[in-house]
Image (cartoon, rainbow, N blue to C red):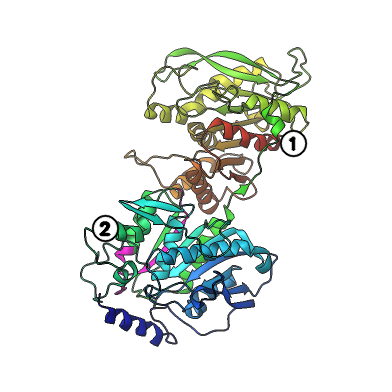
Amino acid sequence: MKKTLSLLLLSLVVGQANAQFGFGGQQIEVKLPISEKFVDINYADDGQAYHNLDVYLPEKKADKYPVVVHIYGSAWFSNSSKGMADLGTICSALLNAGYAVVCPNHRSSNDAQWPAQSHDIKAVIRWIRGNADKYRFDTDFIATSGFSSGGHLSSFMAATTGTKSAEVGKLNVDIEGNIGKYTEYSSMTDAAVDWSGPIDLEHMDCAGELAMKMSPEEVLLGCKLSEENHDRYASLSPMTFLDNADAPTIVFHGTADNVVPYCQGERWANALKQNNITSEFNLVEGGGHGFNMYSEENLGKMVAFLNKIRNAKPVEFKGIPDEVRKPANKQGKIEVFTYTAKSSKGEDITKKARVYLPYGYKADDKKTKYNVLYLMHGGGDNSKSFLMPPLDWLPLAQVLDHLIAEGKMKPIIVVTPTFYDDDENQGGNSMQDAIKATEEFHKELRTYLAPKVEAAYNTYFEGNLEKSRQHRAYGGFSMGALSTWNELAFGINEVQTFLPLSGDMWVFNENGERKSFDEAAVWLNEKIAGSAYAKDFRVLAYTGTRDIAGTPEKNMIISLLAYAPLFTKENVSFQMKQGGEHFYGHINEYLYHALPLLWK
């Protein structure tokens, strides 16, 4: 694009600033529902106007406010449009919903080439965390929102949350930057709103020939679209960096948008769905580029989506005391329990489970009864993995010894079975075998394992699993978490408390395709709705931020709380360990926090 076209577009932005709508989005002049306003705060400590931001606090006062960063649209050509950033529409709706709104300027494409704009918005998010106390920001929830090029930047923040740099082909991209003095703070975000944003910058003509013969991205990148410049253009697209650990995103795009074709929104929505990211797509019939988009219905959908994500935000917990990593003075014992069950082929087989008996357990003391926790291992593991993990990972038996000795939990019996046919898992089982076995284990628990193991030890079981369900819990790690969700679906009459550890629920349609998180949540709600205990169960879910199953489990919890009425904040607890990974050493740390909650 010629420079004259860039300047022409910039003049359109400025000229329409006071119009009903324009490149800066719809601008309705209203009195904002605010209690306080702070303007022209420099977030980069460089005195430059393009690094200023405004803060708006809701009219309804609170001790702390969740935060949304709303970014104006300008085709990246404006460096000072924060005062026209959809204040009367998007920002007002957010303020009325109790969100603090931060509207920043950022460098234009005439000030600096990409990824300078990413560096600026990342710096804004870090500034929010660094000034949380001063402005009463609740940094447990920070989201981004934006219109047009602001929608692109909002989406880019979601797609790169937690990513500081990346290799794109032969190009090394600095995504984070080092703007401002709060570089020690995180720029991670919890959710994003995209209003009419360009996403796939190499295919802006996805709907055919564009009405405007302009290419702002050429100015932003400093090069024309060509095979030689593929890496540069790919570095501008949020789709390039997308994975299932990224922030949930809601997308709005109008069918009559003649600046950014609505197929851009469709492509973004499809990419989010393919990566199993919690998302919603709203195709607005007759919506253009900044008009007919901000209806009360659409603004309500935006707020509802952000509320949904915020309500499911996990609680971070601290680590565990150093002494727990050493053997306790009073140790329980581990026994092998043998029982008869059915194999995957329907044949009678002998199986083994490991049983942890707490220190002081006496077989002849029939008056002392014990609650029972069943814990299922992950794929490829076996019945010893929890209690006697490999290498020098923290063993669960050691965690139990310390918790019981210190009086932090009642003594319990822990049973670790296997969903495989043999307890050592020597059969070379496939993933499909494991999926089927975890889906079916609830039958084995009900018919074979639980009645036999609980009759053999001093438990509350007296011949009827349902009557003693409040004394029984079931959990599992990874594929064992999948068995936990299925136990909830089919065994809620026998088990009261469920501990999915780093694993979401897999539900398949008739074609063998996995259903979405939302569909799986509805399915689970329907499965337990007919039980007399549909309102008498608990889910204690745990995972880690660096766990491969962490984001899927988080998305599962989000969907349950949003679309499964039987699941509420009262019966669902979700905790996430910063840096937690997918292995027993960390899983048994989670159990250090979970076990005292089972039976108080």
- Residue matched to label 2: 230
Q: Position of residue 186 (x, y in %)?
A: 55, 56
Range drawn in magenta: 245-264
Residue 44, image quadrant:
bottom right
| Residue occupied by mark 1 | 600
Q: Which quadrant holds the N terminus?
A: bottom left
* 202 vs 525, nearest the viewer: 202
Q: Amino acid at mark 1?
A: Lys
The C terminus: image quadrant: top right
Give the amino acid at mark 2.
Answer: His
Q: Is residue 539 above or below residue 472?
A: below
Label 1: few (<14), some or many (≥20) within 10 Å?
few
User: From what the image shows, is residue 588 above or below residue 269?
Assistant: above
Disc 2 and disc 1 in contact, CB within 8 angstroms: no
Expressed as whole percent of the image width and height from the top left, the position of residue 491 reads: 55, 32
Q: Nearer the viewer, residue 528 or 247?
A: 247
Q: Is residue 248 visible?
A: yes
32 or 3: which is nearer to us? 3
At numbered mark 2, what does the secondary structure look like: helix, strand or loop?
Answer: helix
Residue 289 at what x, y percent from top left?
Answer: 36, 75
Give the residue displayed 34% in from the left and 38% down from the top.
512
> Which of pointers 2 and 1 lies earlier in the amino acid sequence?
2
Query: Residue 53, image x and y in percent?
Result: 54, 74
Q: Is residue 526 left or right of residue 198?
A: right
* Residue located at (48% from left, 80% from top): 84
| Residue 588 part of the magenta segment | no
242 over 155 or under it: above or below: above
Q: Residue at x 22, y 62 (%)?
A: 226
Could you tell me which secondary element the residue under label 1 belongs to?
A: loop
Q: Is residue 254 left or right of residue 141?
A: left
